[in-house]
Image (spheres, rainbow, N blue to C red):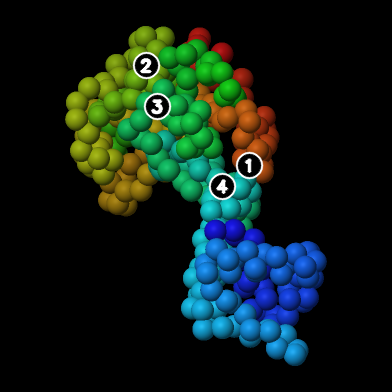
Amino acid sequence: MDLEAVRTFVAITDTGQFQTAADDLGITQQGASRRVAGLERELGVKLFTRLARGVRLTVDGHALLPHARELLRAAERVTTAVTPGRRALRIDVVNRRIAPSGLLHAFYQQQPGIELDVVALSHGDAASALAEISAGTLDATFRSLRASARTVPRGLRSSRVIDDRHEVLVGPRHPLANAKTVTLAELTGHPIWMPGMADAEPIGYYDDLAQAFGLTIDTIGPSFGVEALLAEIADSTRLATFVGEGSRYLWPETYDLRRIPVVDPTPVYPQSVIWRADNTHPVLASFLKYLFTRYKETSRDDVWVPDWAR
């Protein structure tokens, strides 16, 4: 069915005049007449009765009208869904508790009118996330790109935009509980517990960190959720865990957990934003500019990253 003919039929119905509808649509009256005549031939019915001062719908025209309006609404939804700048920008933040999610939220607070589709592919590895970017099912994702030494497949672009500074999270009875800061050397005698980690990217990063500074970082064992981890840390005199400065966790006040910055140097988990080079979504362009500007303003030299991230 000719969508423009349907649009013309609805316009004539709303105005009651071929000429007025044609003017609104930016076509000639003859063009409007041809569109309606073609629609009538296709349907095998008469849609309008001509009057001295305009037109009136026939019984068949009345029957068609609600369906024609719905067809135009559906067409508008289709256009909105695929038009850059009108469809929602779809961003993978990996996990809603960590730095990428916080950055996207801060960006949204600056531009609250934008449409976002926020997803968290916490169980997907980097390769699968990049495949979704290549396929166009995601507009952007955040990964360390450790396995590929920060390179991405043809047609994609990446830029390091997050250096998430590490903090140690301990309970009130831990030996470091009252420290204002802690060095990596001071952590060598304290086990760092990070159970349930399944993604090869962070596992590899923490292996690199442990080897570089002689730390004991345990990523083995099942995860019973963040809440269970926080409860065990709060009750322990020896367990600690790493959290990113940009991560968000909530716990009962009675836990009295302490977040202690790691210094001299500060290890950071480096993350790059990855997107398709030919993606023209205007909100993506604004988001990338926001990330680049923020990274330039906040990056520091007193940090440690593995060799592959330099």
Mark 4 / mark 1, whichever is N-terminal: 4
| Quadrant housing the C terminus | top right
Cα gap from disc 3 to disc 1, whole angstroms: 22 Å
| Quadrant housing the N terminus | bottom right
On the picture, is 257 further left or further right than 300?
left
Quarter of the image where one finds residue 32: bottom right
For badge 4, the amino acid type reads Val
Name the residue that disc number 1 marks: 281
On the picture, is 236 further left or further right than 176?
left
Name the residue that disc number 2 marks: 204
**Mark 1 secondary-structure assignment:** loop
Of 205 and 273, which appears nearest the observer? 273
For badge 2, the amino acid type reads Gly
Name the residue that disc number 3 marks: 128
Q: Residue at x 58, y 66 (%)?
A: 41
Q: Can residue 246 be seen by looking at this rendering?
A: no
User: Of circles 4 and 1, which is in front?
Assistant: 4
Of 303 and 120, which appears nearest the observer? 120
For badge 1, the amino acid type reads His
Cα gap from disc 4 to disc 1, whole angstroms: 10 Å
Mark 3 / mark 4, whichever is N-terminal: 4
Furthest-bottom residue in this view = 52
Q: Are marks 2 and 4 in contact (CB under 8 Å)?
A: no
Cα gap from disc 3 to disc 2, whole angstroms: 17 Å
As displayed, is residue 33 above or below residue 92? below
As displayed, is residue 309 above or below residue 14? above
> What percent of the width, then of the height, locates residue 38?
63, 64
User: Of circles 3 and 4, which is in front?
Assistant: 4
Name the residue that disc number 4 marks: 82
For badge 3, the amino acid type reads Ser
